[in-house]
Amino acid sequence: MNKKYLIIVSSFFFTMIFVFSLMSWASSLMAVERVEEEVTTAPPPPPPIPQIPEKTLTYTVKKGDVLGKILPQFDLNTHEIHTAAKDIFDLANIRIGKQFEFLQVGDEITEVRYALGIDETLIVEKKEGAWVARKQVIRYDNKQSLKSFSVESSFWKAASDAGLQARDISSLVQLFEYDVDFNTEIRAGDKATLLIEELYKDGQFVRLAAPLAVRFQNQKRSFTAIRFKDKEGRVLYYDEKGVSRKGAFLRSPLAFSRVTSSFNPKRFHPILKKPRPHNGTDFGAPTGTPVRAAADGKVVFASTNRGHGKFVKIKHSQGYQTSYSHLSKIHVRRGDRVRQGETIGKVGTTGLSTGPHLHYQMWKNGKFVDAMKEKLPKTQKVPRAEMANFKSIRDRYLQELQGASPESN
């Protein structure tokens, strides 16, 4: 009897476990169905917000352009943008060849960019309906280095082989063009040593900065240029005595060329076939080569002048005058004030000329002088109050220059 009773109880117990298992399983299935139902009945996600198209438009400043002619082409108010930018840069002074960039968002221009220099950009942007301006400056990591080269065939090639770019070479020439005519006075063996900064961005070399100091050996002459920033923020290059490297006159009105005929009062004229004084220097160069004013002055003649063809004459200070003959184009007018280095015309072959060249003349106190040999006046000096600071910088830079050799790069 007890054994039968135990069998009945055990059977009932296992039956109840089975029933509860079935109920739990059924409950789980119902929960899953409810979750699936909730998932399938959830509302769809909202559609993505459409992106407003953006694009950049560019405009290169051409001859005759002014701000009021450019900005209206892009439906911009000239006065508003000029006023916003004026504390940083006066956009009335835009230059030919410079470029504007316009950021267009949808149908509206929201940003105007104008490059002020290689590392600086003026940005005028629209914020809350008003135009505001700022200056964007690229920041670099600097590493000081020495570069040195010796001329074998040409100054340009030697400098290029030492790692200088065209911009660097032109800047280097400008340091010494008041004392050296790079068209006629460069010889094999001439040497240049530069203390210069290399500029890096995110660990990558970008370019060379302006040199801190340069020593240039030209034949038996030695020239030094020291970069110095005065208390007013002006940066100039000076020689070891603190005299500005920038002279009152450029030695040559062409940046790079060759002398085809020198100053010779007894020269035989190739066209007239008779002796005729050659009171100037001829530079051979392609038609269209820019001709620079040798110094600040006032244009006293700018027209055709018989055998000189298209001709410009400039009156300078200290009794000097210069003239520029056989031009293909004249870019100045009589009465204009010109600055040293300003383009006054283009090389040509007008008048009595056998080919494209520039005939350059110089007078001092009314008498012809040889512009290539004349001892031309210097100008600025380091202010006396800052001479001690200059000497300290000079001595440090010169000591650095001693560590370079012509073979090092």
Image (cartoon, helix red, strand yellow):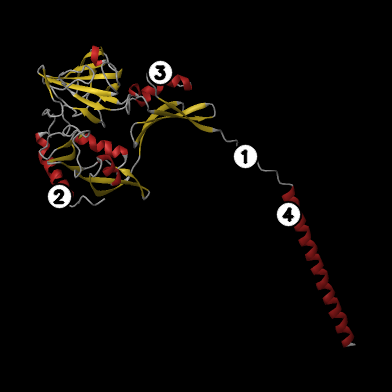
* Badge 2 or badge 3: first in the primary sequence: 3
Which of 219 and 7 lies nearest the eye of the viewer? 219
198 shown above or below 67: below
Name the residue: 26% across, 44% down.
158
Q: Are marks 3 and 1 in contact (CB under 8 Å)?
A: no
What type is the residue that disc 3 sits on?
Answer: Gly
CA gap, disc 3 and disc 4: 67 Å
Examine the rendered structure and indicate whether residue 137 appears above or below residue 405.
above
Identify residue for label 3. 68
Query: Label 1 belongs to which residue?
Result: 48
Left or right: where does residue 86 sit relative to residue 49?
Answer: left
Q: Which residue is mark 4?
A: 35
Of tags 2 and 3, the one toward the viewer is 2
Q: CA distance from mark 4 to mark 2?
A: 82 Å
Where residue 154 appears, x then y in whole percent?
25, 40
Residue 275 left/right relative to 333: left
Which label belongs to residue 399? 2
Please tell me whether mark 1 or mark 4 is closer to you in this view. Answer: 1
Element under label 4? Answer: helix
Separation of disc 2 and disc 3 at Cα? 53 Å
Upstream in sequence: badge 3 or badge 4: 4
Please state which of the two labelled residues, at mark 3 or mark 4, is closer to the viewer: 3
Amino acid carrying mark 1 in the image: Pro
